[in-house]
Amino acid sequence: AKSTHGERFCFYEARMDEAARDRRAIAKDLWEAIKNDEFQIYYQIQKSVMTGETTGYEALLRWIHPTRGFVSPVDFIPVAEECGAILDIGEWVLRTACREAASWDNDAKIAVNLSPVQLGNVNLVQVVHEILIDTGLSPKRLELEITESTIIGDKTRALHILRQIKALGVTIAIDDFGTGYSSLDTLNSFPFDKIKIDRSFLMEAEQSPQSLAIIKAILALGKSLNVPVLAEGVETEAQLGLLRSEGCDEAQGYLLGRPAPMSSEEIRRAKSA
Ligand code: C2E
Ligand code: CA
Ligand code: CA
Ligand code: CA
């Protein structure tokens, strides 16, 4: 029994080792990725549930590694946050998305994900301000998406920074709502302009009365706080129908459009469709 235990332990350790090595390798390559032009931004459309009109696009980072190929942001964003590269990468995403959006001939919003590490950076407000000036993007077209876990740290500080960002005219969306550790108090004291319901709830809504109840509760919350609600991960017509009958404001998901690189030509076509 002792040796079995030992083997299992070694196996576990070896796997940990491998994972750690992998993270170190990814971290090393991340520092080079901007310079080597390995990042690209994909955009995913967001639409009004009632009118079908385009309301915005979420910027989603893509990394094409020279030997690994496509690396998912789910795998490299945490590494970038851990090693600090997320500050440069996040700034690159913000600048590139704002520059590209400024060249589109429509006034759709551009939603950019903000890492908790970026929110902890003392220069964040200055960086956002400079990027808006440099790219000429109207501040009201920029939306920053933050998750609930971003603000469980130093709330007073986070609140101060978010207020300064809002003073620039930029809006704030709370991402993956329902999955973090937030309390209703957080929602009450933070200046959110949009609530994004995490896609896990819609995924289960048709089978699980609990998930449906949570969606309804978030929609009611949005209504009473006068904050629009967007549902993520809409994959089927049935799900879209459900959102319509429940009075959800906006939707995003594969049914409406997969994340894709976007030329101004494509944006124009999407707009006139
Ligand atoms: P997120 O912010 O919740 O982004 C939504 C994710 O759901 C995206 O995955 C998107 O491709 C995916 N998605 C959209 N519609 C559907 C659908 O109908 N079904 C399913 N199954 N999935 C859908 P992606 O692009 O792999 O990004 C994963 C996460 O990585 C993002 O989750 C976000 O947390 C993070 N991320 C991506 N880009 C950035 C970035 O530029 N900065 C930061 N800090 N994080 C980013
Ligand atoms: Ca997001
Ligand atoms: Ca999300
Ligand atoms: Ca997510």
Image: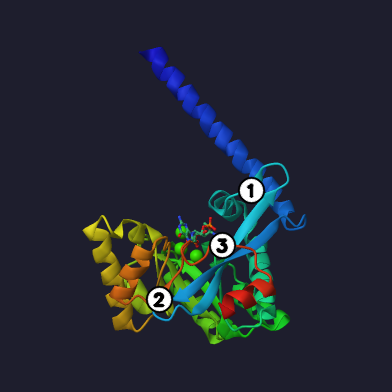
Q: Which residue is mark 2?
A: 49
State whether label 3 is within 8 Å of ligand 1.
yes
Q: Nearer the viewer, mark 1 or mark 2?
A: 2
Q: Which residue is mark 1?
A: 70
Residue 262 in the image, given as x and y percentages of width and height: 65, 68
User: Would you say the residues marked 1 and 2 are in contact, meaning their CB atoms lie under 8 Å apart?
Assistant: no
- Pick the quarter of the image with the N terminus: top left
Q: Secondary structure at mark 2?
A: loop
Question: Can residue 192 be seen?
Answer: no
Residue 159 in the image, given as x and y percentages of width and height: 46, 76
Residue 153 in the image, given as x and y percentages of width and height: 44, 64
Residue 92 in the image, given as x and y percentages of width and height: 68, 66
User: Callout 1: few (<14), some (14-19), or many (20+) C-alpha neighbours within 10 Å?
Assistant: few
- In the rendered structure, the answer to whether residue 252 lies left or right of residue 99 reads left
Figure quadrant of residue 260: bottom right
Q: Residue at x 57, y 38 (%)?
A: 20
In front of the other: 186 or 45: 45
- Pick the quarter of the image with the C terminus: bottom right
Q: Amino acid at mark 1?
A: Phe
In front of the other: 228 or 184: 228
As drawn, the label of residue 181 is: none
| First in residue order: circle 1 vs circle 2 | 2
Q: Which residue is mark 3?
A: 259
Residue furthest left in the image: 209
